[in-house]
């Protein structure tokens, strides 16, 4: 029966982070991811590591700023409204180039919204969220196992590029249990953190963790540096899955996370009705896998159908990637409603049989 | 194709979530793809509990069960809430000691099991959930009883294993007489 | 020739940007002297705020962080928890600590974080040009209280030291002033004690320093010192507000 264990998404996040040598966890309770904090509170002290329940998400992310600035691996976890509060700190962390992990188990919004699964924080995660010209790698797992694998990877990417990384799941991935396996993996060769503010400890010049550059020339130079870094990340760290795209398809679905799982079921049921579908599944939402569309745009008769648990936030990136070369439809549910395979299939049929560009 | 999408529902404290977990473990040990999704948030504070469990040899899409092949309920409100989610021909198992009506649907199979009474005969009302689980597994055949027992042995508390085993076997033993 | 006066090792050579007569430079120096005297420069990590002292990270020779507005105690918590062997201090003004950062300082204190906060209270927002601070006195004229702070409309000043002293996690809280040589020496003593308590692992320590802002008060540096004495000291009484060592005795 192997080494598989049945694990809840939120607990898998904690376990994976600990195995990735996360030394500090700072968090604030919010449904549907509070079990991450509970898991860390239970397990971290025994390892001599740090767990602090902060007074707010604002404080939690700034504790991350402090700990990350000393060079230790650290993280926080929250859900949509909490991530809004953290956005200030994330901007500072991006500006000061500190490696850390932020987990967002997305719930319905805007406002207090709901506590059910949603994907409506796509813009916030990929287009900024906080102020200023910054991006951060955003990983979108579609299973508890992939969440585990990507958490370890995200910590490495954070360290390699000195950047915050986000794992973006949804309430469903957080709450569900699936069989998982913790496999030994080769960590990347990572640069020394000689920039960290650890106390001088014999060093001649002081290290400063900072995102303030009062002289416009200096800030522009800093921003140019950040943009160059983002360019390298775009070249090296894009991840996506092409599912059933090695054939001439009638239509290609585009979906990530929980909705991509549902789309895979739709592909099977469409086959039974004689409709061939593929799936482009972005695993990194930023950088967005534009390349996946280069590879598939000439192998779909009726273009793409983007499926999301939002009002269509990812569609803009799909449009940019497709660049007018194919029609793009959209099917989405919001508020914590989960797209049903039959409803997706009905939309597929509209596009394939009637040749219309659908926007639901 | 072996596939079951099951909703377990009742009051908190009846072992609804753990019943689902044991089945998910058994599915995993039987090399099926499995998912287990609990209700969460304020919904849980009202005293009700439910979980959605999928066992299949196909890929699991959404872990939310919207069209259940089986429904196992341990109180009246749960039957009201979930009866309509059963697919035609689906299986409804209810604890007839706690649910004081039968199904409104006529296109489903219904098993009435007085699980509280039976559990008392075994010495503990707490075993009612395992009696119902035994019946569910036996009737659907989604996993074998042996694998279920093995999973309960491996993932449950050792002190409860013998009692759980008796309850599961008792529930499974009900099936021939209930289904002729 | 004997050297009688030298810059502390804990300060850099960078000239400060502070206005003439501002007491920030002096308070920096007191902290730096304490760091030198305790011999902890090598393991000290400071956190600068947002406000006039935003560039403090350029002036202290220790490793430094620049925090976002009000969050210095949270940042310091992260640092100290990650590096418990280090000496961590925050340097914060009244807007930073007592308005936008109230939650962070209160909770760092009540958690008993083993950090030291130097809280500079000059009763006004300096960097943004003289607006009302949470510590602006009743009747005090600022850019945003042009007719004087009306407590019916703008509420009352916060006595931070007294508030923090109520928290069990705080081990040492004292309010000092830098209006006179005598008080400057007392201020240094208090800052040193706060660092010593941190080194002894006793808990959260805070020293509130009453200071001046001649520019935004519209006074000469000497007049400003007089205004502090005449107006601030009666409202914000000097002295030890909490000392767990004294309580034990």
Image: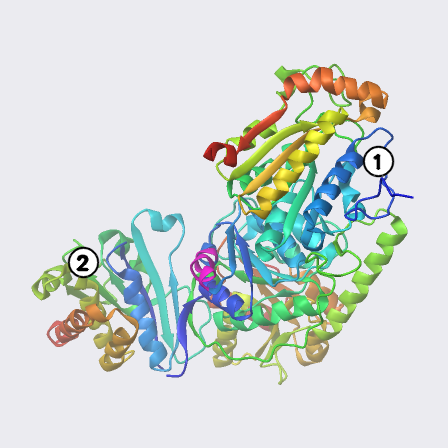
* Relative horizontal placement of residue A176, taking residue A316 as reference (left or right): left
Q: Quadrant of residue B122?
A: bottom left
Q: Is residue A38 magenta?
A: yes
> For the view shown, which residue lies furthest in the front direction?
C1
* Relative horizontal placement of residue A240, taking residue B34 as reference (left or right): right
State if disc 2 and disc 1 touch (CB < 8 Å). no
- Residue A238 place in picture, x, y as percent: 68, 73
Looking at the image, residue C7 lies above or below residue C228: below
Please tell me which residue lies in front, A304 or A47.
A47
Same chain for mark 1 and mark 2? The answer is: no
State the residue position of label 1: C18
Alpha carbon separation for disc pair 1 and 2:
82 Å
- The reply to whether residue A272 is visible in this rendering is yes
Span of residues in magenta: A37-46
* Quadrant housing the C terminus of chain A: bottom right
Q: Is residue A305 magenta?
A: no
Please tell me which residue lies in front, A14 or C181.
C181
- Magenta region, main secondary structure: helix
Please tell me which residue lies in front, B161 or A72.
A72
Please tell me which residue lies in front, C228 or A231.
C228
Which chain does the residue under circle 2 lie in? B
State the residue position of label 2: B102
């Amino acid at each position: 029966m192997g080494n598989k264990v049945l694990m809840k998404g939120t607990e898998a996040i904690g376990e994976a982070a600990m195995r990735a040598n996360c030394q500090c966890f700072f968090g604030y309770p919010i449904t549907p991811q509070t079990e991450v904090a509970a898991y860390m509170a239970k397990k971290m002290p025994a390892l001599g590591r740090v767990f602090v329940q902060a007074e707010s998400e604002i404080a939690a992310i700034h504790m991350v700023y402090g700990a990350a600035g000393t060079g230790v691996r650290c993280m926080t976890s929250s859900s949509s409204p909490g991530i809004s509060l953290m956005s200030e700190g994330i901007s500072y962390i991006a500006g000061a180039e500190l490696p850390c992990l932020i987990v967002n188990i997305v719930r319905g919004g805007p406002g207090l919204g709901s506590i059910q699964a949603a994907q409506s924080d796509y813009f916030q995660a990929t287009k900024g969220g906080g102020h200023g010209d910054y991006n951060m790698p955003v990983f979108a797992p579609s299973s508890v196992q992939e969440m585990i694998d990507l958490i370890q990877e995200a910590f490495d990417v954070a360290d390699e590029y000195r950047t915050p990384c986000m794992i973006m799941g949804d309430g469903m991935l957080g709450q569900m249990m699936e069989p998982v396996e913790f496999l030994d993996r080769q960590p990347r060769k990572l640069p020394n953190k000689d920039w960290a503010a650890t106390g001088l400890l014999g060093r001649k010049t002081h290290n400063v963790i900072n995102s303030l550059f009062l002289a416009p020339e200096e800030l522009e130079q800093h921003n140019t540096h950040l943009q160059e870094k983002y360019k390298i990340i775009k070249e090296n760290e894009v991840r996506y899955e092409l599912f059933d795209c090695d054939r001439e398809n009638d239509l290609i679905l585009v979906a990530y996370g929980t909705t991509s799982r549902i789309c895979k079921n739709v592909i099977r049921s469409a086959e039974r009705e004689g409709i061939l579908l593929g799936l482009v599944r972005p695993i990194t939402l930023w950088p967005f896998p534009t390349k996946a569309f280069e590879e598939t745009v000439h192998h779909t008769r009726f273009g793409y159908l983007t499926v999301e648990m939002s009002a269509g936030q990812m569609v803009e990136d799909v449009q940019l990637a497709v660049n007018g070369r194919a029609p793009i439809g959209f099917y989405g549910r919001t508020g914590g409603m989960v797209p049903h395979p039959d409803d997706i299939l009905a939309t597929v049929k509209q596009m394939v049989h009637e040749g219309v560009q659908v926007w639901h | 194709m072996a596939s079951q999408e099951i909703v377990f529902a009742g009051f908190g404290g009846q072992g609804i979530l753990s019943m689902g977990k044991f089945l998910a473990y058994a599915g995993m040990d039987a090399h099926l793809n499995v998912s287990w999704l609990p209700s969460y948030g304020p919904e849980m504070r009202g005293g009700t509990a439910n979980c959605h469990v999928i066992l299949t040899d196909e890929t699991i899409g959404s872990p939310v069960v919207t069209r259940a092949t089986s429904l196992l309920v341990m109180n009246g409100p749960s039957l009201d809430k979930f009866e309509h989610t059963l697919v035609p021909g689906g299986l409804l198992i209810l604890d007839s000691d706690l649910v004081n009506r039968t199904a409104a649907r006529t296109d489903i199979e219904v098993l009435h099991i007085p699980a509280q009474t039976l559990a008392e005969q075994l010495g503990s009302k707490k075993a009612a959930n395992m009696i119902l689980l035994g019946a569910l597994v036996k009737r659907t055949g989604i996993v074998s009883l042996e694998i279920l027992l093995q999973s309960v042995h491996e993932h449950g508390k050792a002190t409860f294993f013998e009692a759980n085993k008796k309850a599961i076997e008792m529930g499974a033993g009900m099936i021939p007489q209930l289904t002729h | 020739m004997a050297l009688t006066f030298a810059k502390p090792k804990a300060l850099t050579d960078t000239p400060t940007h502070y206005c003439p007569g501002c007491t920030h430079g002096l308070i920096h120096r007191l902290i730096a002297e304490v760091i030198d005297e305790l011999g902890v420069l090598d393991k000290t990590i400071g956190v600068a705020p947002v406000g006039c002292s935003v560039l403090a990270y350029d002036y202290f020779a220790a490793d430094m962080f620049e925090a976002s507005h009000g969050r210095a105690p949270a940042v310091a918590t992260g640092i100290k928890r990650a590096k418990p062997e280090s000496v961590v201090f925050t340097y914060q003004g009244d807007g930073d600590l007592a308005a936008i950062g109230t939650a962070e300082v209160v909770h760092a204190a009540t958690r008993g974080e083993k950090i030291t906060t130097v809280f500079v209270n000059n009763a006004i927002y300096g960097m943004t040009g003289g607006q009302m601070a949470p510590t602006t006195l009743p009747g005090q004229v600022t850019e945003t209280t042009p007719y004087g702070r009306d407590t019916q409309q703008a509420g009352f000043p916060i006595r931070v030291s007294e508030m923090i002293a109520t928290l069990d996690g705080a081990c040492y809280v004292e309010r000092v002033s830098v209006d006179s040589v005598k008080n400057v020496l007392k201020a240094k003593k208090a800052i040193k004690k706060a660092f010593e308590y941190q080194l002894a692992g006793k808990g959260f320590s805070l020293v509130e320093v009453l200071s001046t802002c001649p520019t935004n008060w519209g006074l000469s540096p000497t007049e400003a010192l007089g205004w502090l004495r005449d107006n601030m000291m009666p409202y914000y009484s000097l002295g030890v507000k909490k000392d767990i060592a004294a309580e034990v005795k």
